[in-house]
Image (cartoon, rainbow, N blue to C red):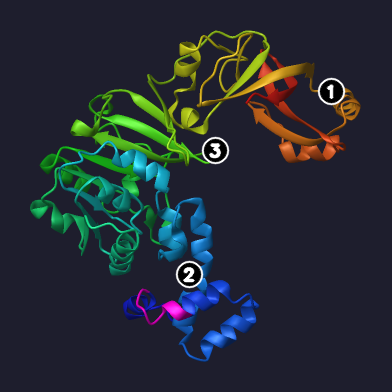
Amino acid sequence: MPEPSLEDYHWLVSEQAQPYLDDAATSGVSFVALTKRLRADLTPQRTHLILEQVELRDRARAKFSRPEKMFFTRKLLEQSTDEQIASYKASRFPSDQPVADLCCGIGGDALALAKRGPCLAVDRDPVATLLTEVNSHTLGLSNLSSEVADVHSLIERLDSAAWHIDPDRRVAAQRTSQAVYSEPSLDVIQSLHQRIGAGAIKLAPSAELADDWIDEKAVELEWIGSRRECRQQVVWLGSLAQNAGLRTATVVDRNDENASFTGEVDIEVDVSAPGRFLYVPDSTLLASHLAGALAADLQLKGTSYGLSYYTADEFRDSPLLEVFEISELLNLDMKRLKRLLRERNVGTLEIKVRGVEVDPAELRKKLQPKGSASATLLVFRSYDEVKVAVAHRMP
C-alpha cells in the first residue's frame, strides 16, 4: 500500500475525519470488523490513518496528558519529548522573547515552549509542521506558528532570542546515537550557534561530541530522565547554560517535582564492605558519569572499584538514588539463597545486578520463588567477591 499523502493528513485533521476517529475509538468491535466498516467509505491509506491514530493516541498517554485529541505519526511519537521533560526544558528559556524549535517533529518541545511565549516550530517535513500546529490549536495555544523549511536555509533570517534543535538521528533508514551523523550536520548547528548564541541541542543519552567541535567547558551537558529511564541529553549553549563546564543529571515526573544534581565527572569514592543500606544510582547519573560525584556529596562508599553500588550505615535521601535496606547479605550460593527465599515465603522477586556476569532472568529461573511475600535481590561485587543482598526498597 502506498504511504499516506500530505493530502491524506490534511483530511485526517479535518472535521471530515472526526466521525471516523470517534467511531474507531468507541466502537468496541473487532479490528477486522472495524477495518471492513471503514473501508466501505475510505481509501486504504485513510483507513490506515484512522486505525493507527487510535493506537498512537493510546500509546501517547505515557508522554502526553491530553493525547485523545492530538495527532501523531508512529515515528514522530517515538522521537517526541515527554511532556514533563519538555516543560522542564522550556522553563530554561526566556519567557518574554521569541524562540524557535527546529526539527520540531510532532511538537513535544515546541508545545511546551509556546506555553511560555512566542515559538516558531520548524521542520522540513510538512506532515510534522501540520500536526504540530493542529496540536497547538487543540491545546489552546496561540503563541505557536510553524514553517516548513530546512534549518540551513533558515539560519540567516531566523529572528529568535534562543533556539532548540532535535537533529534527526535516522540516517539512511538506520538510527544512530552519534551526533556526528545527525541531520542537520554539526557544522550547520555550529553556524546557527555562531549567529544566535543561546541554544539547546537534544541528543541521545549515549551521544558523544567531538572535542574539536565544542568546548565542554563553555557548555552545560544535561541528562534528563523520566519513568525510570534516561531519555535524552541536552547541550545547553550560551546564556541557557546555567552551569558551564559542569554536567547535570535531572529526573522529572508527572507532578513536576524535578530533581537535579550538578557536578564533575568520574569522581571516585572509597570502597568499603556493604553497610546497612545500598544505593542504586539513577540511569541519568550513570549516563552523565555523575554517580561518583553524588556519592561523594552524600558521603557514600562504593561496594567495589569500577561499576558498583554505593553503601552507608546511615540513610541518605535523594530522588536520584534508589535506596534499599539490607536484611541479609550472603555470597552467591544458590542452595542457601533458594532456602532463604523459601523460608521467607518470597514469591515476588525484583532482581538488580551491577558489575557482575549474572543474568537476572536465569537467576530467577533457578531460584523459582514461590510465596506471598516480596523482596529485592541485589547482586554485586564487593571487593573480589560476588555478594547477594536480600533487601527491601525504602519509600
Name the residue type under label 1: Asp
On the image, numbered disc 2 is attached to which residue? Answer: 53
On the image, numbered disc 1 is attached to which residue? Answer: 333
Task: Determine which of the numbered discs, if any, sits on residue 228 in the image.
Answer: 3
Question: Is residue 300 visible to us here?
Answer: yes
Q: What is the magenta range? A: 13-19
For disc 1, the neighbor class at 10 Å (few under 14, some 14 to 19, many from 20) is few
State the image coordinates of residue 311 (x, y, percent, origin top left).
Answer: 61, 14
Distance Cα–Cα, label 2 vs label 3: 27 Å
Name the residue type under label 3: Arg
Q: Looking at the image, tell me whether mark 2 or mark 3 is earlier in sequence order.
A: 2
Q: Nearer the viewer, mark 3 or mark 1?
A: 3
For disc 3, the neighbor class at 10 Å (few under 14, some 14 to 19, many from 20) is few
Q: Toward the viewer: 330 or 260? A: 260
Q: Residue at x 64, y 8 (%)?
A: 313
State the image coordinates of residue 177 (x, y, percent, origin top left).
Answer: 41, 46
Above or below, 18 against 183 in this view is: below
State the image coordinates of residue 216 (x, y, percent, origin top left).
Answer: 28, 28
Q: Is residue 119 left or right of residue 173?
A: left
Task: Determine which of the numbered discs, if any, sits on residue 50 in the image.
Answer: none
Q: Toward the viewer: 305 or 196? A: 196
Distance Cα–Cα, label 3 vs label 1: 30 Å
Above or below, 18 against 251 in this view is: below
Instruction: Tell me the SS state at disc 3.
Output: loop
